[in-house]
Image: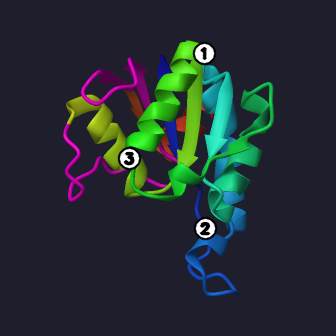
Amino acid sequence: MQLLLLRHGLAEEVAASGRDSDRALTPEGRQRLSHSLPGLIRIGARPDQLWSSPWRRAAETAELLRPLVRSAPALFQPLAQAPDSELIAALNDFERQSGGSLMLVGHQPWLGMLARWLMTGERETTQELPVPKGGLLWLSGEPDPGAMRLELFARPARLIALGAG
C-alpha cells in the first residue's frame, strides 16, 4: 500500500468562533497548495482515495487537492485526533479492499505520530516526525505498526519547485 500523509496548508491563527477546528486556510496557504499541486502530480501522487480531517483547514486543503483523485475527498473523524487502533483498522480495511494508494490530510502532531507508529511500531505520544504545513510524507508497505517505510519526505517549497520545473 502507498500511504501519503499531507499536512494541511497555512491557516489563520484564530478563527472568528475561537474554535481550533474552525480555522480556515489563509490566502497564502491556498496559493502555496495550488502551486504544490503540479509538484504532487509530477512525483506521482495520484491516490485512489483522499481522506481528510473534518476540521476546516484540512477539509479546505483536501478540496484544493481534488484534481489528484477521481472521487470527492471523504471526511474522516479519526484524523482529528491522536492515531489509534480505529485508524489502523480503517487503513487495513482500505488496503484489503483496494490495495492501492490513499492520501490522508490532517494535522500535527497527529500525522507525525501516525508516521512514526507505522514505521517504528512505537506509539509513544511525546515524539513525532515533524511535518511542515503543506508537507508530505510518503509511506509504503503494510499499514501496520512497524511495517511501513518512508519513501519520500517533501517540504512544500520542494513540491512547489518540482511543479515549476
Residue at the image point whose x is 64% and y is 52% from the top: 32
Tell me the number on the disc at residue 45.
none
Determine which residue is flagged by label 2: 11
Determine which residue is flagged by label 3: 84
Q: Nearer the viewer, residue 32 or 145?
A: 145
In the rendered structure, the answer to whether residue 105 lies left or right of residue 5 reads right
Residue 126: x percent and y percent? Answer: 21, 59
- Asked if residue 18 is among those painted magenta in the image, a careful observer would answer no
Residue at the image point whose x is 59% and y is 40% from the top: 160
Work out which quarter of the rendered image holds the C terminus and state it. top right
Residue 22: x percent and y percent? Answer: 66, 73
Looking at the magenta stretch, what is its main secondary structure? Answer: loop
Q: Distance of mark 2 from mark 1, alpha carbons?
A: 34 Å
Determine which residue is flagged by label 1: 97
Q: Earlier in the sequence, mark 2 or mark 3?
A: 2
Q: Residues within 10 Å of mark 2 (few under 14, many from 20)?
A: many
Q: Secondary structure at mark 1?
A: helix
Residue at the image point whose x is 66% and y is 48% from the top: 33
The amino acid type of the residue labelled 1 equals: Gln
Q: Nearer the viewer, residue 15 or 76?
A: 76
Q: Nearer the viewer, residue 69 or 94?
A: 94
Q: Secondary structure at mark 3?
A: loop
Q: Distance of mark 1 from mark 3, alpha carbons?
A: 20 Å
Which of pointers 2 and 3 indicates the residue nearer the eye? Answer: 3
Q: Secondary structure at mark 2?
A: loop
Residues rendered magenta in the picture: 122-151
